[in-house]
Image (cartoon, rainbow, N blue to C red):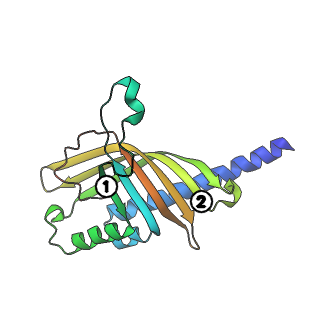
C-alpha cells in the first residue's frame, strides 16, 4: 500500500511541476512579447518583488552575501503598484531607457517545486525554485545578460496561478547594464 501511495504522490508532484512550468514559461513569453499588462495580471494584489544586492565575501561570511534585511539596499524592492507604474512609464513611448523598447529573452531551467500546501494533490500554494538567464538587447550596441536563481511563491486562483512573492538572486555583484528598466 505504501508503494501505491508513494507512486500516486510522485505522479501528483510531477503533474503539479508540469503545470507550474507551463505557467512560468507562459509568463516569460508575455514578457518577451512585451505584453506587459497581461504579464502584470499574473501577479496577486499583495505581490512583493525583491532583487537584493550581492557582495563578494570570503568563505566564512558567505551566508551573508545577499543583503536580505528589510532596510538593506536592493536593485528592486517593489510591489504590484510600482510594477504597474513602471509599465505605464514604458508604454508612454517617452521612457528614455526604453525607447526604442528592449528585446528580451527570458530562459528558465531547473524548475523545482519545493513545497506544496496543503499537498501536491490539492496544492493551493507552492514554493518554486529555478535558475534563469535574461538577455536584453537594445539599439545596436547594448547587450546585457543577467544570470541567477529565483524563488517564487505562487497561489492558485480561480483560473490559474498568481505570483505572490518573488526573490531574484543575481550572480553578478556588479551589473554592467546601462539601466535596469527591463523586467527580470
Q: CA distance from mark 1 to mark 2?
A: 24 Å
Residue 6, quarter of picture: top right
Query: Where does label 1 land, which residue?
Result: 76
* Residue sitting at x 45%, y 62%: 26
Judged by depth in the image, the label closer to the viewer, 1 or 2, is 1
Q: Nearer the viewer, residue 131 or 44?
A: 44
Q: Which mark is residue 128?
A: none
Tell which residue pokes out farthest to the right in this image: 1
Q: Is 177 on the left-hand or right-hand side of 147?
A: left
Are the residues at dot 1 and dot 2 in contact (C-beta closer than 8 Å)? Answer: no
Using the rendered image of the protein, determine whether residue 113 is visible from the camera's viewpoint: yes
Q: Tell me the quadrant of the picture where the C terminus can be found.
A: bottom left
SS assignment at label 2: strand
Quadrant of the image occupied by residue 18:
bottom right
Residue occupying the point 46% across, 58% down: 165
Q: Nearest the camera: 79 or 61? A: 61
Q: Residue furthest front?
A: 71
View extreme (top): residue: 59
Circle number at residue 125:
2
Q: Identify which residue is drawn at 39% across, 30% down.
A: 62
Amino acid at each position: 500500500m505504501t508503494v501505491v501511495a508513494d507512486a500516486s504522490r510522485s505522479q501528483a508532484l510531477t503533474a503539479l511541476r508540469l503545470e507550474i512550468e507551463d505557467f512560468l514559461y507562459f509568463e516569460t513569453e508575455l514578457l518577451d512579447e512585451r505584453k506587459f499588462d497581461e504579464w502584470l495580471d499574473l501577479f496577486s494584489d499583495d505581490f512583493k518583488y525583491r532583487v537584493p544586492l550581492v557582495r563578494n565575501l570570503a568563505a566564512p561570511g558567505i551566508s551573508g552575501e545577499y543583503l536580505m534585511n528589510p532596510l538593506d539596499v536592493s536593485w528592486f524592492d517593489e510591489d504590484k503598484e510600482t510594477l504597474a507604474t513602471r509599465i505605464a512609464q514604458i508604454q508612454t513611448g517617452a521612457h528614455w531607457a526604453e525607447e526604442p523598447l528592449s528585446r528580451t529573452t527570458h530562459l528558465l531551467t531547473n524548475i523545482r517545486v519545493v513545497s506544496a500546501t496543503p499537498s501536491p494533490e490539492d496544492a493551493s500554494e507552492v514554493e518554486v525554485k529555478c535558475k534563469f538567464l535574461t538577455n536584453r538587447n537594445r539599439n545596436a550596441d547594448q547587450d546585457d545578460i543577467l544570470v541567477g536563481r529565483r524563488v517564487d511563491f505562487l497561489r492558485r486562483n480561480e483560473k490559474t496561478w498568481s505570483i505572490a512573492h518573488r526573490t531574484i538572486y543575481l550572480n553578478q555583484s556588479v551589473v554592467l547594464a546601462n539601466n535596469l528598466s527591463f523586467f527580470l
